[in-house]
Amino acid sequence: MADEKVKKCAHPACSCQVDKGKRYCCDYCHDAGHSLEISCNCRHPECAAKSVAAVGT
């Protein structure tokens, strides 16, 4: 389905993309989506790369 657009996970600290019709990339983000966490621990490559880059600055 090439015409489906992707968007960012609804968890504020998550960088993952989700398919159209979904709000969260996984159960972790769904459960933490309304919390005030400042980091994401979903363990997906998109967020892991962002965390490593932030530590290096």
Image (cartoon, rainbow, N blue to C red):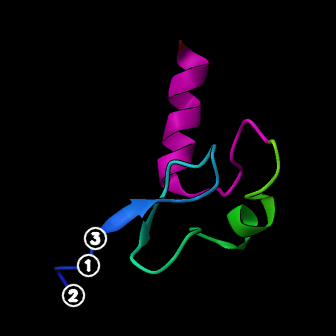
Instruction: Indicate the amino acid at tag 1.
Output: Glu
The range drawn in magenta is: 37-56
Under circle 2, the secondary element is loop
x 59%, y 68%: residue:
24
Q: Position of residue 15 (x, y in %)?
A: 51, 48
Question: Which residue has dot 1 on it?
Answer: 4
Determine crowd level at label 1: few under 14, some 14-19, many 20+ residues with C-alpha closer than 10 A. few
- The answer to whether marks 3 and 2 mark residues whose Cβ atoms lie closer than 8 Å is no
Determine crowd level at label 2: few under 14, some 14-19, many 20+ residues with C-alpha closer than 10 A. few
Q: Quadrant of residue 30?
A: bottom right
Under circle 3, the secondary element is loop
x 67%, y 57%: residue:
42
Looking at the picture, tell me which residue is in the foreground, 44 or 34: 34
Task: Judge from the rendering whether residue 3 lies leftward or rightward of residue 23; answer left or right.
Answer: left
Question: Which residue has dot 2 on it?
Answer: 1
Task: Judge from the rendering whether residue 4 lies leftward or rightward of residue 3; answer left or right.
Answer: right
- The answer to whether marks 1 and 3 mark residues whose Cβ atoms lie closer than 8 Å is yes
Looking at the picture, tell me which residue is in the foreground, 3 or 43: 3
Question: Which residue has dot 3 on it?
Answer: 5
Q: Position of residue 36 (x, y in %)?
A: 81, 42
